[in-house]
Amino acid sequence: MKKSTMFSNILQTIIPKEEILPLINEAGYVDSARKFTVYDLFLFLSQAALQQWDGYRDGEKRMSSSGLATVDHSTISKKAKDVPFELFKQLLSLMIQKCNRPTRRRLRIPKELLVVDSTKITVGIGRLPWAPLKGEKAGIKLHVSLIADTGKLHKVTETTGYRPDISSCEDVLDDCFILVADRAYGKHRKFDDYLEQKQYFVIRLRDNTHFHEPELRTRKRPYAGTLEQDLTCQLGTASTLSKNRFRVVILKDPHGNPVILATNLHRPSAEKIADMYKKRWQIEVFFRWIKQHLNVPTLFGTTPNAIYGQLYSALLVYVLLKFVFDQGNAIVHPSAKLSFAEFDRLFSMNELQPEWTVYLTSNLTFP
């Protein structure tokens, strides 16, 4: 069985056509097409991400070999422009719900780390005049939360490139997790809201942050490694001063630059707080991976529906691949275990070991 056909079969098994129909009705879209339906567009965009097609014209040439209904590129473009992208956003949420369900049952009361950040995709201003940036650039952002220890996608939202990260943070948060984020999310007065909402966090502050009435925390042993201070204080100057006192852990990065972390966690050691923040690198790896492997920087259309529909479909492919990989790696013999990068490469080249092929064709199960 060809790789592309195998993936299409897996995708149609976990999200069959009948599950998408209520979402189409909910979006208020009337799918009157017979030759190329919304579901056909969904399969097309997913295959385009997996196989890194160059656009609608390139996809037109490859549809048949991928087991998809064939139409001309203008039909695909028109459909992508017409279908509300919120539908694909809901499909991504449905895929996340299905693929993360076993983890949630095992964890009971999870307090894992939820890493939050955004990635920007830029093009020329002529391509996206509705999303202008500085100069002759235009762009959009994907705001993402990722479960650090598993690499599973948790929530996603979209904005134009000018939207500040902090303004979209609420859309991807979950108070069942500990928020871990970089300086773009370090608004002092927002910390007061998190404290009231019982949203735990570890967030890096800007190097010039003002500490109001700092007090060193009691410590039984000397600082080790790159740790320098562990204190509590109010944050900011008079105009931005936080109402509450927060814990601040200060350390050095490998280049000797200060890393200042604010948190409302008081029981973990300073070393543990530092380790939590180091998990943030996983979202950088995630952004790099989707851009290299799912064609994310290559935007096919020019309208919000076409752009965001394509991107949400690509993220859905990531969620499905991660689920298939995690389940397979837990089943196959230790000698056949792979890293996610190895699995993706071999799967894309249709060169997986026989044990993996048997798993994908016969033993793959969905929640």
Image: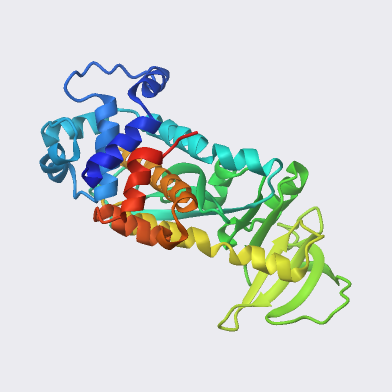
Q: Is residue 109 left or right of residue 322?
A: right
Residue 222 in view:
yes
In front of the other: 338 or 158: 338
Q: Residue at x 13, y 32 (%)?
A: 70
Above or below: residue 328 compared with residue 235 = above
User: Splitting the image into 4 quarters, where does residue 310 fall?
Assistant: top left
Q: Residue at x 24, y 56 (%)?
A: 349
Residue 164 in picture, x, y percent from top left: 51, 51
Residue 113 in picture, x, y percent from top left: 63, 54
User: Splitting the image into 4 quarters, where does residue 158 fall?
Assistant: top left
Q: Is residue 331 left or right of residue 361?
A: right
Q: Residue at x 24, y 24 (%)?
A: 37
In front of the other: 69 or 300: 69
Residue 300 in picture, x, y percent from top left: 23, 44
In front of the other: 316 or 321: 321
Residue 135 in view:
no
Above or below: residue 234 compared with residue 166 = below
Marks counted in the figure total 0
Residue 216 in picture, x, y percent from top left: 85, 73
Q: Residue at x 47, y 49 (%)?
A: 331
